[in-house]
Image (cartoon, rainbow, N blue to C red):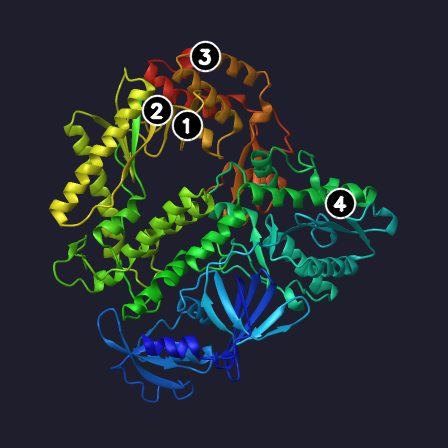
Amino acid sequence: MGALNKETSEAGQAGARSIGESYEGVVLTRDWRDRAEGVELVFWIASDAGPLRIVLTNQRPVCFVERSAVLGDALRDHAPLARRPLALSTMAGRAVDALYFLRQSDLRAAREQLRTRGVALYESDVKPTDRFLMERFATSSIAVSGRAVHRDGYRELHNPIVRRTQHRPALRAMAIDIETSRSGQRLYSIAGATQDAERVFVIGPPECASGSDLCACADERTLLSAFLAWVREIDPDLLLGWNVVNFDLRLIQSAAARLGVPFALGRGGELARLLPARVPGQRHAARVPGRVVLDGIDTLRAAFWSFASLSLDAVARELLGRGKLLEGSPDKPATIERLFEQDKPALARYNLEDCRLVLDIFAEARLIDFAMRRSELTGLALDRHGGSVAAFDNLYLPRLHRRGHVAPDVGERHSDIASPGGYVMDSQPGLYENVIVLDFKSLYPSIVRTFRVDPLGLATPGEHPVAGFLGARFSRGCAILPELISELWGQREQARERGDRAMVQAIKIIMNSFYGVLGSSGCRFHDARLANSITRRGHEIITRSRRRLERDGYRVIYGDTDSIFVLLGPGPTEEEARVCGQRLAAMLNRWWQAVVRDEHDLESFLEVCFETHFARFLMPTVRGAEKGSKKRYAGLVTSAGGGSEVVFKGLESVRTDWTPLARTFQRGLYRRVFLDQPYEEFLRDTVRRLEAGELDAQLVYRKRLRRPLDQYCRQTPPHVQAARKQARTGGWIRYVITRAGPEPEDAIGHALDYDHYREKQLKPVADAILQFLGTSFERVTGAQLAIF
C-alpha cells in the first residue's frame, strides 16, 4: 500500500514543502477537471478564517489491473503514463499493478477499450476527488497547510499539504425564495434571509420600497443582478429552500439565461449550474462552487422525518405552530398576481416569511447538524442525500487497501439470487390486553458484528470460518465491516451520552444502510451470499426467539423484522408489564449469548430491549378475510406524564391516501374502545353529521400524479379523473367523490356522494375493530348497503 499512498497522496503537493499558513475547515464543494498537465482538483472549504479555495494540480488518475494481464497495443491512443507493481492483490488473491494516467478522460477511454478485449480494471470508476479524500481517511473536514493568496472575499491555496481533521466551523446559512407570474416565465420578487440579515428584491417603482429590507428594482435584469450582488455580499456557506433546486434555482437560471445575466451564484464569481435529473421525475442537482444547496424536503426525508404532507405550510404548522401567510387562499397564483400589481409590500412580506419558515424549520429539526454529521460519517458531500453505495465505498475502500486488496469496478459482479426481506411473522388477529414489544437493537448491524459478515471475509475465509447462508463462509479474523460497525456503534453511544441527536440519527441511518448496499447490484461488492447471510440470519433469530418465549409459556402474536409482540393478557399493571418486559429481554440476551458461543464459538452482539407496553392492542385482519394483517396495528400506551396515547402503525390514521374524515374517525373510535368508553353514539353522530354536510371539509382525498396523464391508459384512478377535469398535469391532486364521480376540490359541480364516504371511509375503519366486539358498523348505525 505504501507505493500507492506515495503516488496518490503526495503527487501534486511537491510545491507545498514550505509550510506557510494552516487552516481547518469543512469541505463545501468538490470538483475536478482535466488539464493539459494532469487532473486539477478544486475544494471549497468553510473555515473559521473564512472561505478557502484549495487547488491541487498535476494529479494522476489511478486504477488497477491484474499483473498477469497483457495490454499490448490495446491502449495505443490512451496509454498510461506508468504501470507499476504494488504490494496489493484482488480479493481473490491475484497480484495487481497500478496504472497511472495523465487525465481522467484517458483512464475512462482505456477502460472501454480494455473491456472490449475482456481485460478487467479495478476501481477505475472512483472519482478523483473521492480518491483523494478517502485515501487520507478524510470525510467532511480537512486541515491544509501552505501559502495562501488573498482573493476577493476568500483565500486560495495551491497544492497545500492536506490531512484529515475533525474541525466543525459554524456555517452561515441563507434561505431563498422567489415569487413569479402564474406561468413562471417572469420573476416578481426574490427574498433571502439569514439569522441576522433579510432582503426582498421586487420589481417596482422606488416608492414601493418600505424599509431597508425591501429593494425596488426597475426590471428583471436589475432584480437578478441586485440579488446576486447581495448574495456575494452576505457570502453564505449554505443556500436553503423548499423545492429550491427544481423550482427557485431552476427559474432563476432560466431567467438569467433569457436576460443575459451571468448565473454567478458561486463564490469568487463562479457560475452555478443545474444538472438535469438522470431519471425523469427526479430532482435536478445544483452545482454552486463554494456553496452548498440544501433542500428542506430532501433533507427532512434523509433524516427520516415523517409528515402527512411535505408542503412548506404543513411542515411549518406542525413543527413551528405557524404557516405561510397566504395559505388558504382559494386561488393563490391569482392572489400573488394581485399583490404584485396592487400591494408590493404585502407580496414582499409573504415572500420573506417563506424564507423565515425555512430557516426556522432547519433550526427546529436540526437539519444542518444532521447533514454535517452524515457527511462526517460517510464522506459524502453535504447536499448528497442518497448515495449509500458511495458512502460504503468511502468507508470500506481505504480500509480494504490497508489490508492489501483492491476492489472490482461496479457491475463486474452479477447475481440472480434475490435476498429475502425482513422476516414478518403471520399475526394472530384480535383485540388484546397488555402486549409488550421486545426489540432487537440495530438487528442487521449486530448480525454483521456477531457473525462476521464481510466482503473481504467472504473472499478470504481462512481456517474455521463462520458459516453463513447460501454456502457463505466468513473469516473470523480478516474482516472489515464488523470492525467498522463496531466503531460506529461506539460513536453512537458517545453521541447519545452527550445529547448529540443529529449524530445519533446519522449513525443509525448509515449503519442500517449497509445491508441494503450489499444487496444492491450497484455495489461493487454485491454478492447474494452477503445479503442473505444477514436477512436469513434475522429470520432465524426472530423465529428461534419466538420458540424460546413460547417454551416459557408466553404467547407471541406477531413479529416484524426486529420486533416480537408478546401477549401478557389481563391483570398486570403498567409497572408490572414493564418489569416483565425487561426481564424477558434480559433472558433472551443471556440465551443468545449462550447460543452464539456454543454453536458458533463467537461473542454475541445481539441486544434485545424492552421497547413498548400496549395496555390495549389491536391486530386487525386483512380486509375482507380472516387472515391477520402485517405491519398494521394500533395500541394504547401510557405517556411519560401518565396520560394515554393511541399509536397507529400502517392504518388509515397515518396514511395520506385516506381522507381526514377516516383518520379523525379512527382516532376517535379506537380511543373510546381502548379506554372502554361508550362508542355507539359516536358512530351514529358521525354518520349524522356526514349526511348533514357538517363534515364536508374532511372529505378531500389527496394523491400525487406519478406520471403524465396520457400514460394512464388501462386504468384511470380517481385522482387521474379529477386531474383531467382540472387540466392538471402533475403534482398533488385534491379531489372529492360526488354523485358524478371524482371532481377537483376547487371545481365541484355535483352533490357529494355521502354514501361513498360512509361505505368506503367510515365502515372499513369501524369494522376493523368492531368485529372483535361482536358487532359491526351497520348494526350500530343502522346503515345498509345501497342496492341501486
Q: Is mark 2 in CB contact (under 8 Å) with mark 1? A: yes
Disc 3: which residue: 781
Disc 4: which residue: 348
Specify which label sits upstream in the sequence, 4 or 2. 4
Q: CA distance from mark 2 to mark 3?
A: 29 Å
- Determine the residue positioned at 34% across, 65% down: 397
Mark 2 or 3: the one toward you:
2
Q: Which mark is residue 614?
A: 2
Q: CA distance from mark 2 to mark 1?
A: 9 Å
Q: CA distance from mark 1 to mark 3?
A: 26 Å
Disc 1: which residue: 647
Local crowd size for mark 1, using a 10 Å CA cut-off: few (<14), some (14–19), many (≥20): some
Q: Is mark 4 in CB contact (under 8 Å) with mark 3? A: no
Q: Give the structural element (helix, strand or loop) at label 2.
A: strand
- Determine the residue positioned at 30% across, 68% down: 402
Residue 311, x across and y down, in percent: 58, 41
